[in-house]
Image (cartoon, rainbow, N blue to C red):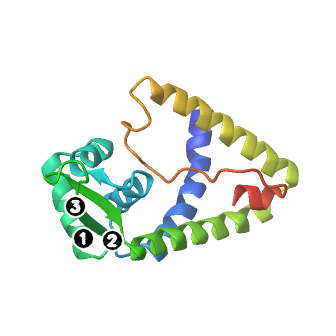
Amino acid sequence: MAAELDAAAGALLSVWEAARERTTSRLSGPQLRAVIVVERHDGINLRRLATLLDMLLSSASRLCDRLVAAGMLEREPGRLDRREISLHLTPEARRLLGELRQDRRRRLADVLAGMSGEGRDALLRGIREFDRVAREQEGTAGTAAERPVLAPPPPRGAVDDPVARSA
């Protein structure tokens, strides 16, 4: 079963990667992950970012330098400790993430439209259960805030149309 899932997941990953390449061609994979972490944890400090990305502090610092130079991140002195730097997304980074998600959802909707309603419903149920179990297993490795971030979170909220709900 694991081998079959691994093979089938390749199609999903290729849809995601195609959207990433088109939308975020000027960001590397690690840079995109950093932007996503800062989006989730606005005002995060460099040390916590390095921890969440599972990087050395010096590597995270250089990564942030490049993201600031690219206009994706802003640094600001901490509100409680002026020696600590807070990281925030720029409007350009927010726009880029919005485009990425919109393109990815459009590509997913195109594939889902070719599936039967039963297939879409079964896929969604299975993915939700997979997500729940994976998060429970990851929970033994630390809190959600301490785990490395690999991908954006799934959209929240129910929608009646299975294609729209999955997109």
Determine whether the residue tagged by mark 2 lies in a helix, strand or loop.
Answer: loop
Label 1 packing within 10 angstroms: few (<14), some (14-19), many (20+): some
Spatial CA span between label 3 and label 2: 11 Å
Quarter of the picture containing the N terminus is top right
Q: Which residue is mark 3?
A: 63
Classify 10 Å Cα crowding around label 3: few (below 14), some (14-19), many (20 and above): some
Residue designated by label 2: 72
166 to the left or right of 116: left
Distance of label 3 from label 1 (alpha carbons): 9 Å
Secondary structure of the residue carrying tag 3 is: helix
- The residue at the point 50 percent across, 26 percent down is 137
Question: Is residue 71 placed above or below 113 in the rendered structure?
Answer: below
Camera-nearest residue between 85 and 142: 85
Please say if the residues under marks 2 and 1 sit with CB atoms less than 8 Å apart.
yes
| Labels 3, 2: front one | 2
Q: Position of residue 12 (x, y in %)?
A: 59, 56
What's under tag 2, amino acid-wise? Met
Earlier sequence position, callout 3 versus callout 1: 3
- Residue 131 position, x and y percent, is 60, 38
Q: Residue 12 or 90: which is nearer the viewer?
A: 90
In this rendering, position of residue 55 left or right of residue 92: left
Q: Secondary structure at mark 1?
A: helix
Q: For the point 67% across and 34% down, which residue is it?
A: 129
Q: Residue 165: x percent and y percent?
A: 75, 56
- Classify residue 163 by image quadrant: bottom right
Q: Which of the 4 quarters of the picture holds residue 90?
A: bottom left
- In the rendered structure, which amino acid carries the disc numbered 3? Leu
Amino acid at circle 1: Val
The residue that mark 1 highlights is 68
| 146 sits left or right of 51 in the view | right
Residue appearing at x 64%, y 65% in the figure: 105
